[in-house]
Image (spheres, grey):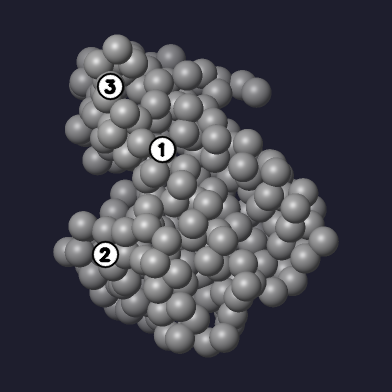
Amino acid sequence: MNIDLMNKTALITGGGRDIGRAIACQLADAGASVVVNYHTSADQAHATVNEIKRRGGHAVAVQADVTCTQAAQRLVETAINTFGGSLDILVNNAGGLLARKKIREMDEAFWDAVMAVNLKSVFLVTRAALPYMNAGGAIVNVSSLAARNGGGGGSVAYATAKGGVLTMTRGLSKELAPQKIRVNCVSPGLINTTFHDTFTPGEVRKTVAANTSAGREGESEDVANAVVFLASDAASYLNGESVEINGGLYYV
């Protein structure tokens, strides 16, 4: 399938590394001009932009804490000012586990921080972007297998936030349908990323990978393939959907 995103502008939150980097590069390979948002991963974000430019694409890195209203607004305005007067594709990818904590170990600040980076950020950036999105626009949110199965040990806050992303996707798909803006999401399982390098022991990863029908961990490119499809006109009849990217580990 030949996906053509020429003359489209795409914004990816958390786009500097791992899944975000793969999404940014594949959107650019399909012809989109890409805004790569980052919070603290400046080196990775600029490396992603440089790779896109090396491959002949157009990209810019923009720092913004997408849990902050003003920063989210500035991020969108920078995207618009850099690549034209509209935004065609928004990928809400920013998120993270922060730490594995059981609920009795959490304080309110930790809970709020997990909700902010994984769920509030989707609300803030989407709200900021909508005035600039025209008919035919696409929003792709990144949820997680944790939204389906509750996550691994110590991830109840993360799983709850990602469940919110899944529900928000469905609600927004209805709300924005009259404007001809589609909203879908992807729900990755075990993907070979910094996330699991940090939070998931190697033996657990081997066990989970062995239990997939694919017999392996996923790669960031596996997720990016689905995101680019959902962002394109090839998915014009998909709305409010979640694509489960878990190697057959879990069925909906």
User: Could you tell whether 60 is left or right of 183 in the image?
Assistant: left
Count of marks, rendered view: 3
The residue indicated by pointer 2 is 45
Neighbours of disc 3 within 10 Å: few (<14), some (14-19), many (20+) = few
Q: Secondary structure at mark 2?
A: helix
Placement of 41 over or under 240, stated as above or below: below
The residue indicated by pointer 1 is 115
The residue indicated by pointer 3 is 106
Q: Secondary structure at mark 3?
A: loop
Q: Alpha-carbon distance for marks 3 and 1?
A: 13 Å
User: Could you tell whether 139 is left or right of 197 in the image?
Assistant: right
User: Could you tell whether 121 is left or right of 141 in the image?
Assistant: left
Placement of 103 over or under 122, stated as above or below: above
Q: Check disc 3 and give the amino acid type.
A: Met
User: Could you tell whether 248 is left or right of 238 in the image?
Assistant: left
| Percent coordinates x, y for residue 11 in the rendering | 47, 67
Q: Check disc 2 and give the amino acid type.
A: Ala
Residue 43 position by quadrant:
bottom left
Residue 74 position by quadrant:
bottom left
Residue 2 seen in the current view: no
